Amino acid sequence: MDNELISDMIPRIEKGIAILIDGGIIAYPTDTVYGLGASSDNINGIKRIYEVKKRPMNMPLPLLLADVSWIERVTFSVPEIAYQLIDSFLPGALTLVFKKADTIPDIVSGGKSTIALRIPDHPVTVTLINGVGKPLIGTSANLSGKPSASNAEEVKNQLGDKIDYILDGGPCPGGKESSIIDVTGNIPVLLREGAISKADIEKVCEIILPGEEI
């Protein structure tokens, strides 16, 4: 997405930022699929996301960050293998699971001690995050169990008027959800193979699948 198009979208982005700061929830484009977001420190907004998606409260919500420097704000520690994956794939379609910092509300992590983080490679998303000044909830803008939305019309068809705003940024360039890797153990665990293939990840580091032992 070029700078001229971003300039044309500034009023929409500013509206989205204002709604998020005010505690609302919005759908927005990312480099993978449309996300459904609230400011990560707004408990009421986060509760609404669970309700709108019909998502069980024990299922964690991922966070989107503006850049790599934000990771240490929201994690307990960052293992060396995580930095290798970050250098290779972020910003981009990779979500990493870390042990979370105590500052992250339990409602975000579904009561778990871990948090899923991603740095999107999309200027609209990053501008939103920087405008809010907080990590953004980055769950997909769809009903739980239904297909992810790759454009604003698909978001509207699934979520309708249950959210405060759909920031239409055109179709998402990726169209496929991120891959997810848990880096909390000795060997990274591939929890979901998405936009980044298992083969490409294995060029960077050894990984295992859930339940596997080395």
Image (cartoon, rainbow, N blue to C red):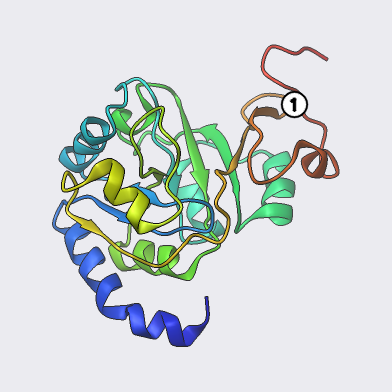
Most extreme residue toward the right is: 203
In this rendering, does residue 136 appear at all? no
Which residue is at a point 61% across and 56% down the rendered structure image? 92
> Horizontal placement of 51 versus 155: left or right?
left
Residue beneath disc 1? 187
Vertical arrangement, residue 113 with respect to residue 47, above or below: above
- Residue 83 lies, in percent from the top left, at 69, 48
Return the x and y of residue 180 as percentages of the image width and height: 60, 36
Is 31 rendered above or below residue 206? below
Q: Is 115 or 34 nearer to us in this picture?
A: 34
Tell me the residue at 75%/13% (across/down).
212
- Would residue 84 be visible to someone looking at this image? yes
SS at circle 1: loop
Q: Amino acid at mark 1?
A: Ile
Q: Position of residue 168 (x, y in %)?
A: 33, 65
Q: Is residue 82 left or right of residue 108?
A: right
Q: Residue at x 55, y 43 (%)?
A: 177
Quarter containing the C terminus: top right
Q: Residue at horizontal 30%, vertical 63%?
A: 167
Q: Nearer the viewer, residue 22 or 157?
A: 157
Farthest bottom residue? 4
